[in-house]
Image (tube, grey):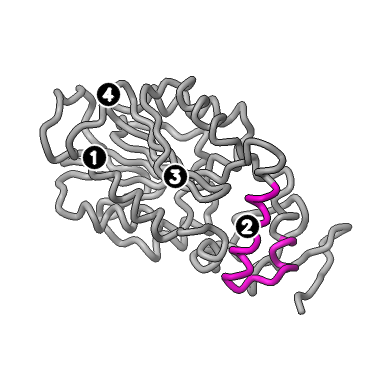
Amino acid sequence: MTGKRTNGDKTLGNVDETISAVPGEWRFNEEVSQAFDSHVRKSVPFYDEIQRMVVELSEYFVGDGSMVYDLGSSTGETLYRLADYHSGKENLQLTGVEVSEAMIEEARRKVQAPSVGFRHNNILDVELSPAPDLVTSVFTLQFLRLAERRRLLRRLAESLVEGGALILLEKTRGDSPAFEDMWTELYWDFKRRQGLSPEEVLEKASSLRGVLNPLTMEENMALLQQSGFSRVEPFFKWYNWAGFLAVKNHSLAAPAGGVAGPEPERPGHPPAEGDRG
């Protein structure tokens, strides 16, 4: 049976075997970071397939000398896979931006590739310089308020090179209360199939009150287009989880190693904070 503890006036409940949280106060702290790779696979449907798709899509935007940012890089799973897949590219820079020091510590233990570095920074404040060819955000922007999300997306669209892209994964809301109820029930069924107890599922939902701020599919699409992305296309959908590919002012053409238009002028690539090697 799941244990209960108190944290001030709030009840501290388990959301997984080794993770506890209180209502409305979900945090990516040391406890979460140490169990994150296991917990996220119990919480996000098709997590490994999604990561594979992100890497596969990246081939259209990443070439020699490319700059890639992963916003909310957590334990570095996306960067680990990108670095391995693009290991033959020259002068590639992959930078993770993460506000949790505990997550960065876990990421640095996992990712040893010399092309990868991490910045301990809030994604709302980070300078995207040199200009990125690709930005990934895997289930991160859903924790931002709408005004923050809008401001960040506009800055991403401005910062990307011509023809660059954002790969965005988000938890979403249903377009109607009926769909929202269905998607939530089916999602909770998924979590129970992964071994989480009904009480743990409810404790996690409670901990995310006021912390998670998902939008509908249509709202996500409209916001990306309003922010300056000329082409936006969903590439993944599972009930209340979705992935979007948003491209800046350029038609999607051949992979980055193939035929491409003229390269934009930009400064050289100084090492990102935390780069090793």
Which amino acid is tagged 2? Leu
Q: Residues within 10 Å of mark 3 (few under 14, many from 20)?
A: many
Range drawn in magenta: 181-203
Which amino acid is tagged 1? Tyr
- Image-based side of 254 in relation to 226, left or right: left
- Which of marks 2 and 4 precedes in the sequence? 2
Report the mark closest to the observer, 4 or 2.
Answer: 2
- Which of marks 2 and 1 precedes in the sequence? 1
SS at mark 4? loop
Q: Residues within 10 Å of mark 2 (few under 14, many from 20)?
A: some
Question: Closest to the observer: 174 or 263?
Answer: 174
- Image-based side of 147 in relation to 159, left or right: right
* Mark 4 to mark 2 CA distance (whole Å): 38 Å
Report the mark closest to the observer, 4 or 3.
Answer: 4
SS at mark 2? helix
Q: Which residue is mark 3?
A: 97
The numbered mark at residue 153 is none
Give percent across and percent down for residue 249.
31, 21
The numbered mark at residue 186 is 2
SS at mark 3? strand
- Image-based side of 150 in relation to 179, left or right: left
The numbered mark at residue 60 is 1
Question: Closest to the observer: 237 or 202?
Answer: 237
Q: Name which residue lies at 31% across and 30% down.
A: 131
